[in-house]
Image (cartoon, rainbow, N blue to C red):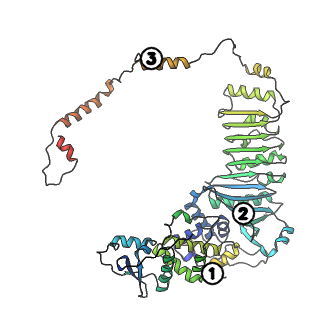
């Protein structure tokens, strides 16, 4: 194998070569030594404006990491999968490379054919969360903590929620779990990645989230709930907007929310809340809500005031000249500035000596002629 | 990408002479020099595009006659190509080289490095980025260990877990040591 003396080239050459590579290759190069990692980080900083966000996709007990660029192209970085001897036998052990990542040893497989040739890293099933956390932290360090990281979890198994429970620096999450998740894992995930911008998706919990769960600090939530989260959200949500789709809802949850919101006791950040009830048979006692929340109904015979006609009336008066607007009058406090203006006018009216032709002169000739 | 090449008869007025480091003279059409930002700027500064200006030979002390020959071949081929867009250089998932380019750059590594340096010196962006892409393609698709071998990098990894054999440590991997990688934009080593 011929060697390439890449690092003896000028920086411009090195940078251009690195910029033409995919992020999977940059990731692998970063693993070669501390210096190469530092160099890849340096390159990332200079070309970071091309990256829109970094997407982590949890599915089938695995996690894939992809860089999505601003031009909507995407570059896969890596795939994480559970350690599997039968899989190793099928692909061939000679293609499995032992590689150290952030102080831990991982088996890495480099596919030689397929649609997306990205390195596959195998995690130990016993230490899945820890391994996934290590790799994700490495990725965050490599691409920078200032980037937007999104998690999409589309799991069929309970393990996916556990797998992502320690991921840090996630800004936007899209849950699509088909299995019931342990509330503790979800709590743990939001503790690791608090104050998220947006959380969406469907989720069914076993147990309840803590009252002070960081999930409730999310700015905007759009949740398709199966009666496991709604009550908690209506009690503890501290974000700006919540869009909920629920099976059923307790009347007491609505009344306590309205009363606390009205009294400005809680939900100070809340701007918008919508709860859609999917189950058509489900109902709640509207009279009970009215009485508990002190809701007063307007008399339908009293027509509310309409302002439309008044606006038209005033527009007509202005058009007819019946309403006029006075020019602003100079106040006494403006006297100083008025004096200055007068002085300026005086200066303008006094003739200025004209410059001799043939000598160097500055300014506008036309102005001089006017004077 | 392919372009039809209309036949033009070169006249002495629209040529300049460049001299390679080994003293060989090359007659270059001014149209060709437009692809090299260095030469184009030089011609513009000395007004060599005017017919009434005497054109002295331009010495290119960093480029050998063999490299110059190769570069002229590139310039001739891309004579009527549209101007190179700088943003074409960034990563693209679907990038292929045309057959002519593959044949043109089917040369040993050391020759390619020299050509890369020459392209960098003369600032021919299309040639420069093409060689960079070719070089990147020679590094990509390899494991960390294979990349270490290709780029001649010493590792920080303590030992191979399978064999237990200690791997030579990277002596230059201290926090401030960057001996392997130069971050300063220095001129190309000739």
User: Can residue B178 be seen here?
Assistant: no
Against B82, residue A301 (above or below) is: above
How far is disc 2 from disc 3 in space, using C-alphas?
A: 71 Å
Q: Nearer the viewer, residue A65 or A171?
A: A65
Q: Are marks 2 and 3 on the same chain?
A: yes
Query: Which label sits in the foreground, 2 or 3?
Result: 3
Q: Which residue is mark 2?
A: A78
Q: Which residue is mark 3?
A: A317
The disc, 1 or 3, on the residue closer to the chain's N-terminal end is 1
Left or right position of A140 against B63:
right
Query: Which label sits in the foreground, 1 or 3?
Result: 3
Left or right position of A43 against B76:
right
Counting from the top left corner in percent of width and height, residue A195 is at 67, 45
User: Number of marks in the image?
Assistant: 3
How far is disc 1 from disc 3 in space, using C-alphas?
A: 87 Å
Residue lying at 17% horizontally and 43% vertically, measured from the top left: A369
Q: Which residue is mark 1?
A: A3
User: Which chain does the residue under circle 1 lie in?
Assistant: A
* Quarter in which the N terminus of chain A is drawn: bottom right
Counting from the top left corner in percent of width and height, residue B51 is at 31, 74
């Amino acid at each position: 194998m011929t060697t390439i003396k890449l690092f003896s080239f000028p920086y411009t050459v090195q940078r251009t070569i690195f910029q033409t590579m995919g992020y999977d290759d940059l990731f692998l190069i970063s693993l070669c030594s501390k210096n190469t990692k530092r160099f890849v980080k340096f390159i990332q900083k200079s070309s970071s404006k091309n990256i829109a966000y970094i997407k982590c996709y949890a599915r089938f007990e695995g996690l894939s990491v992809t860089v999505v660029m601003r031009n909507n192209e995407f570059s896969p970085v890596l795939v994480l999968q559970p350690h599997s001897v039968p899989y190793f036998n099928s692909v061939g052990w000679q293609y499995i490379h032992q590689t150290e990542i952030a102080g831990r040893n991982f088996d890495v497989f480099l596919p030689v054919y397929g649609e997306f040739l990205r390195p596959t890293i195998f995690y130990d099933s016993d230490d899945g969360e820890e391994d996934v956390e290590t790799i994700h932290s490495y990725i965050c360090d490599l691409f920078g903590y200032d980037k937007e990281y999104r998690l999409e979890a589309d799991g069929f198994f309970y393990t996916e929620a556990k797998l992502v429970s320690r991921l840090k620096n996630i800004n936007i999450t899209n849950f699509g779990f088909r299995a019931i998740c342990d509330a503790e894992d979800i709590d743990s995930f939001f503790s690791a990645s608090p104050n998220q911008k947006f959380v969406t998706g469907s989720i069914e919990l076993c147990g309840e989230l803590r009252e002070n769960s960081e999930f409730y600090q999310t700015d905007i939530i759009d949740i398709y709930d199966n009666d496991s989260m709604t009550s908690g959200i209506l009690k503890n949500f501290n974000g700006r907007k919540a869009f909920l789709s629920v099976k059923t809802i307790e009347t007491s949850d609505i009344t306590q929310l309205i009363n606390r919101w009205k009294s400005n006791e809680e939900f100070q950040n809340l701007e918008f809340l919508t709860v859609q009830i999917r189950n058509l048979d489900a109902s709640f006692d509207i009279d009970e809500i009215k009485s508990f929340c002190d809701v007063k109904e307007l008399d339908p015979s009293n027509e509310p005031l309409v302002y439309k006609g008044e606006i038209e009336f005033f527009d007509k008066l202005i058009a007819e000249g019946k309403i006029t607007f006075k020019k602003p009058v100079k106040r006494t406090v403006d006297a100083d500035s008025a004096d200055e203006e007068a002085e300026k006018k005086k200066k303008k009216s006094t003739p200025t000596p004209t410059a001799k032709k043939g000598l160097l002169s500055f300014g506008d000739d036309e102005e001089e002629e006017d004077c | 990408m392919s372009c039809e090449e209309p036949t033009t008869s070169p006249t002495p007025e629209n040529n300049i002479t460049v001299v390679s480091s080994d003293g060989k003279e090359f007659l270059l059409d001014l149209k060709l020099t437009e692809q090299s930002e260095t030469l184009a700027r030089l011609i513009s500064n000395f007004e060599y595009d005017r017919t009434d200006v005497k054109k002295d030979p331009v010495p290119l002390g960093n480029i050998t006659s063999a490299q110059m020959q190769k570069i002229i071949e590139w310039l001739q081929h891309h004579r009527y190509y549209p101007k190179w867009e700088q943003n074409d250089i960034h990563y693209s998932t679907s990038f292929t080289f045309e057959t002519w380019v593959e044949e043109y750059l089917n040369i040993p590594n050391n020759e390619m490095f020299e050509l890369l340096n020459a392209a960098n010196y003369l600032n021919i962006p299309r040639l420069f980025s093409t060689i960079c892409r070719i070089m990147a393609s020679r590094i990509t698709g390899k494991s960390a260990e294979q990349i270490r071998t290709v780029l001649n990098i010493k590792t920080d990894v303590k030992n191979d877990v399978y064999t237990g054999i200690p791997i030579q440590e990277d002596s230059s991997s201290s926090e401030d040591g960057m001996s392997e990688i130069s971050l300063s934009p220095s001129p190309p080593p000739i």
